[in-house]
Image (cartoon, rainbow, N blue to C red):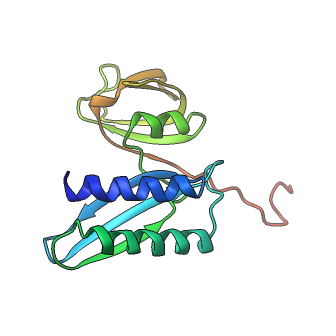
Amino acid sequence: MSALEEVKDLATAVARRRALTLWDVEMAGAPGRAVVRVYVDADPPGQIDLDTVAEVSEEISRGLDLRDPIAGRYTLEVSSPGLERNLRSADHFARSVGSRVVLKTKDPDQRTGSHRIDGVISDAGPDYVVVEGDEGSQRVMLSNIKSARTVFEWQDRSPQAGRK
C-alpha cells in the first residue's frame, strides 16, 4: 500500500467515526518535505466547524505517527474543502448536483471550440456529468475533465441591495 493510500485509509476511518465525509487527500512536495492535505466535510456540505477540524487533525496525526507511512518529515494540513471546492471523483460531482461549476476539458467542445464549461450540474453518473449553461445542456465524460471546481455565488446583503 502506498503512503497516499495509507493516509486515505486512516483519514476515511477517522472521518467515518465522526460521521464526516473524507472529501480528498493530496500529497505534494519532495520526500522529507512532503505536505499532506486532508479535506473533510459534514453532511450537509459546508456544515463543519473549526473545533471538529482540529480534532480530526489531531486524530489523523496520532494515527500517522503510529503507522509511519510517510518517509521523512512532512506537514499535515486538515481543513474543509471550502466554498469553492475541487471536484475530482464521480462522488464529488454527484454530491455537487445543483451547484454552479467551472470545468476545463482536455478536448474542446465541438459546438464552441472552448475547453471551458460554466454552468450548473444537473446530473452526474459514474462516468459523466451534465452541466446546464449558456450553451445549453452539455454531457461531459469524467475522463475528459482536466479540472473542475464549484463556484460560490456571492449575494449582496447590504441594506441598499435591491433599492432603486
Residue located at (16% from left, 77% from top): 72
> Measured along the vertical axis of the image, is residue 122 above or below residue 15?
above
Location of residue 118 in the rendering, given as x and y in whole percent from the top left corner:
46, 37
Check the image and report above or below for 125 versus 95.
Answer: above
The residue at 55%/41% (across/down) is: 100
Asked whether the viewer can see residue 89, the reply is yes
Q: Say whether residue 27 is left or right of residue 128.
A: left
Q: Hey, which quadrant is residue 138 in on the image?
A: top left
Name the one closer to the observer, 54 or 162.
54
Residue 64, percent from left and from top? 33, 70
Q: Give the left or right position of residue 135, taking residue 5 as reference.
A: right
Residue 12, horizontal then vertical, whole percent: 43, 53
Quadrant of the rendered image containing residue 26: bottom left
In which image quadrant can residue 65 be found? Answer: bottom left
Q: Residue at x 36, y 53 (%)?
A: 9
In screen coordinates, is 32 left or right of 74? Answer: left
- Residue sitting nearer the eye, 103 or 124: 124
Q: Where is residue 79 in the image (x, y as percent from the top left)?
A: 48, 66
Q: Quick one: which residue is furthest to the left in this view?
A: 31
Looking at the figure, which quarter contains the C terminus?
A: bottom right
Q: Is residue 146 above or below residue 10?
A: above
Q: Is residue 81 visible?
A: no
Looking at the image, the residue that sits furthest to the front is 66
- Total count of labels: 0
